[in-house]
């Protein structure tokens, strides 16, 4: 990790002037730093997991924005159209180290319901859980 921080610091001026997506990368670095700090302090929260595309119809077309949820919340809200969805059930079917299978269902969006969906934690036990879509 120190070599990545050193690389980022050495290339920050170039990135700010030449790299259009630098803001996204800075936000990701802040998020990662906050997660690591929370993990070290023992106050970490579960990270978001992709649950599917927003099925809301906006101006005659499906929104389609990627929806994410966390294990500590029963509600999700689409960042694009603002439509909210409530999870009516969430169950961890199996967990083994850094892999798990989960089942969940929504009150108003059955297209998002999943059974035995594979989730993984990449790298280590302090990483966020995510849908294993590969």
Image (cartoon, grey):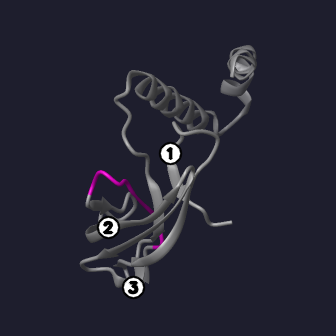
**Image position, residue 25 (x, y; %):** 61, 35
Q: Quadrant of the C terminus?
A: bottom right
**Residue at image location 27% in from the left, 54% down from the top:** 73
Predominant secondary structure, magenta span: loop
Confirm or deny contact between disc 3 and disc 2 (CB under 8 A): no
Q: CA distance from mark 1 to mark 2?
A: 17 Å
Residue 60 covered by magenta stretch? no
**Which is more toward the observer, 69 or 21?**
69
| N-terminal label among 1 and 2 | 2
Q: CA distance from mark 3 to mark 1?
A: 35 Å
**Residue at image location 37% in from the left, 80% down from the top:** 59
**Residue at image location 55% in from the left, 36% down from the top:** 28
- Neighbours of disc 1 within 10 Å: few (<14), some (14-19), many (20+): many
| N-terminal label among 3 and 2 | 3
Q: Which residue is mark 2?
A: 90
Q: CA distance from mark 3 to mark 2?
A: 31 Å
Q: Which residue is mark 1?
A: 128
Does 121 appear above or below 94? Answer: above
**Image position, residue 89 (x, y; %):** 27, 71
Look at the image and give the residue range highlighted in magenta.
Answer: 64-73
Does 69 appear above or below 8? Answer: below
């Amino acid at each position: 990790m120190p070599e990545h921080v050193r690389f980022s610091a050495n290339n920050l001026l170039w990135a700010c002037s030449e790299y259009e997506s630098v803001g996204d990368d800075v936000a990701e670095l802040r998020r990662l730093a906050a997660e690591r700090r929370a993990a070290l302090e023992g106050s970490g929260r579960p990270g978001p997991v992709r649950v599917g595309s927003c099925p809301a119809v906006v101006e005659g077309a499906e929104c389609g924005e990627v929806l994410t949820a966390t294990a500590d919340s029963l509600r999700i809200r689409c960042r694009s159209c603002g439509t909210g969805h409530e999870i009516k059930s969430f169950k961890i079917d199996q967990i083994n180290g850094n892999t798990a299978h989960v089942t969940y269902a929504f009150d108003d969006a059955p297209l998002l319901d999943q059974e035995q969906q594979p989730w993984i934690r990449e790298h280590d036990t302090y990483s966020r859980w995510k849908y294993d879509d590969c």
